[in-house]
């Protein structure tokens, strides 16, 4: 079965909601255009979202069909060049914060469908683009041409003939429109992704980005992937941080067939063995145990078991035991809320930064990371302090 046939079947499998959107809108959902190109309180796809970088802040552009500020004057070939090469209509280079390194893998059919959607179905918004805060000479863009030559592969996704159509559909979505590696793959010395597909063990192995730790996706159970992407939570886990926006704006709209394909592809990627902490947190941490009993056990259970499909389990929780504890730590301090989707209502957890001092928060996190079979390194007061600074930004 061809990838196009599988795609058409996936739209049919999604039922009325998928039938109500055009092929181009479906591609836009898969590519999560809204999350990056819509500023808080701004018009949809009118740009303005701020992205911090080591060199300064940059801002997403207006991609509505407005002819002055948006992409209304783009021909398809110019749009295609921007999406695949990172070159705007006027010839200036785009920063690779715009994931053209992934979008380059999209098929010609999907790219044309996306173009038609943006030009014909999205309302034009006369919102001016904001220049980046990167100062000269670092703002010069000619080095991006060198960066592209070194790190950018502009080839369309090539199906693996040794794999099934479903596996290839999942790989296509993950590597291409879904641009999962933009957050979940660690970066190299030039901020390039250290792997663009499953051939590289670093691909989707987890990375810190914008104050959160995007978890390792390799080897995840397909059913868990499908549930998390559809509703924001699974039997034993829940999404947190920016991933909630991905579910809200993108993955909840994908067909079950596509979600299953993504899950099967991620499951096929060999997971790295969990690294043994040089010093594991101790379950007999009495101060941490006391804080857990006071603030956490009512919902998460005395053994960290949680409640199926409602309250995440803490025992065996990959976010809790990740080498980088940042996301779990921020959830403890700031709280979290699962996304509201067409399939499930949101569930909220309060934050405890107001009542836990740095030592108490570190003890609690260390208790979570060393109990019920968890064997991760303890958390220090300094890590808590750094996480609090992120909250203040």
Image (tube, helix red, strand yellow):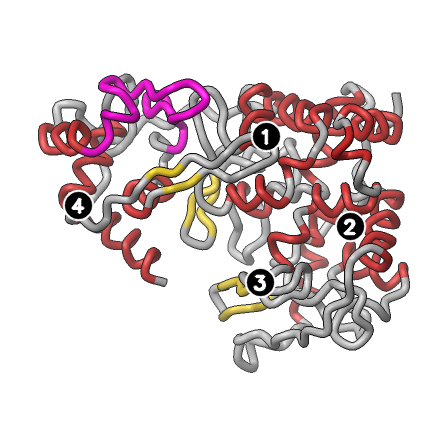
Percent coordinates x, y for residue 385 in the rendering: 23, 53
Mark 2 vs mark 3: give the one in front: 3
Tell me which label, 1 or 3, sits earlier in the chain.
Answer: 3
10 lies above or below 248? above
Of the residues under marks 4 and 1, which one precedes in the sequence? 1
What secondary structure characterizes most of the magenta part?
Answer: loop
Q: CA distance from mark 2 to mark 4?
A: 49 Å
Nearer the N terminus, badge 3 or badge 4? 3
Is there CB contact under 8 Å for labels 3 and 4? no
Closer to us: mark 2 or mark 4?
Answer: 4
**Disc 1 from disc 3: Cα separation:** 25 Å
Q: Which residues are magenta?
A: 295-319
Question: Which mark sits nearer the N-terminus, 2 or 4?
Answer: 2
In the picture of the structure, the residue carrying the numbered disc 2 is 154
Q: Position of residue 74 (x, y in %)?
A: 86, 67
Residue under label 3, please give it. 39
Examine the structure image and report whether residue 351 is included in the region drawn in magenta: no
The residue indicated by pointer 4 is 356
C-alpha separation, residue under disc 3 versus residue under disc 4? 33 Å
Identify whether 115 is placed above or below 200. below
Q: Residues within 10 Å of mark 2 (few under 14, many from 20)?
A: some
Disc 1 target residue: 343
Q: Label 2: state its secondary structure.
A: loop
Gap between marks 2 and 1, in whole Å?
36 Å
**What x and y, as percent, mark residue 345?**
50, 34
Q: Which one is closest to the eye, mark 1 or mark 3? A: 1
229 and 383: which is toward the camera: 229
Q: Which comes before the other along the chain, label 2 or label 1? A: 2
- The circle on residue 133 is none
Marks 1 & 3, CB-CB < 8 Å contact: no
Assess whether residue 308 is covered by the magenta stretch.
yes
């Amino acid at each position: 079965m061809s990838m196009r046939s599988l795609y058409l079947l996936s739209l049919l499998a999604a039922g009325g909601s998928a039938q109500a959107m055009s092929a181009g809108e479906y591609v836009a959902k898969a590519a999560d255009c809204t999350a990056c190109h819509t500023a808080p309180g701004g018009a949809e796809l009118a740009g303005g979202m701020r992205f911090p970088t080591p060199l300064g802040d940059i801002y997403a552009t207006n991609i509505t069909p407005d002819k002055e500020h948006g992409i209304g004057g783009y021909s398809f070939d110019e749009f295609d060049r921007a999406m695949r090469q990172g070159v705007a209509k006027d010839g200036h280079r785009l920063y690779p914060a715009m994931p053209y390194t992934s979008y380059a893998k999209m098929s010609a059919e999907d790219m044309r469908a996306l173009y038609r959607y943006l030009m014909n179905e999205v309302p034009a918004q006369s919102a001016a683009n904001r220049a980046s805060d990167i100062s000269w000479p670092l703002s010069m863009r000619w080095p991006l041409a060198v960066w592209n030559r070194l790190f950018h592969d502009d080839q369309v996704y090539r199906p693996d003939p040794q794999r099934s159509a479903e596996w290839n559909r999942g790989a296509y979505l993950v590597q291409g429109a879904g641009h999962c590696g933009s957050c979940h793959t660690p970066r190299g010395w030039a901020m390039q992704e250290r792997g663009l597909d499953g051939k590289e063990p670093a691909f989707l192995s987890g990375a810190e980005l914008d104050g959160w730790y995007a978890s390792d996706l390799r080897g995840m159970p397909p059913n868990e992937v499908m549930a998390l992407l559809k509703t924001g939570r699974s039997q034993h886990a829940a999404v947190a941080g920016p991933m909630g926006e991905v579910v809200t704006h993108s993955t909840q709209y994908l067909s079950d067939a596509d979600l299953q394909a993504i899950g099967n592809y991620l499951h096929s990627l060999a997971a790295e063995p969990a690294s043994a902490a040089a010093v594991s947190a101790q379950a007999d941490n009495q101060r941490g145990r006391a804080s857990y009993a006071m603030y956490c056990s009512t919902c998460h259970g005395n053994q960290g078991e949680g409640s199926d499909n409602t309250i995440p389990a803490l025992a065996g929780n990959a976010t809790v035991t990740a080498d980088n504890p940042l996301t779990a730590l921020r959830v403890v301090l700031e709280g979290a809320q699962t996304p509201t989707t067409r399939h499930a209502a949101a569930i909220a957890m309060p934050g405890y930064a107001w009542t836990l001092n740095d030592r108490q928060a570190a003890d609690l996190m260390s208790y979570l990371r060393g109990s019920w079979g968890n064997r991760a390194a303890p958390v220090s007061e300094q890590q808590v302090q750094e996480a609090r600074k992120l909250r203040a930004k």
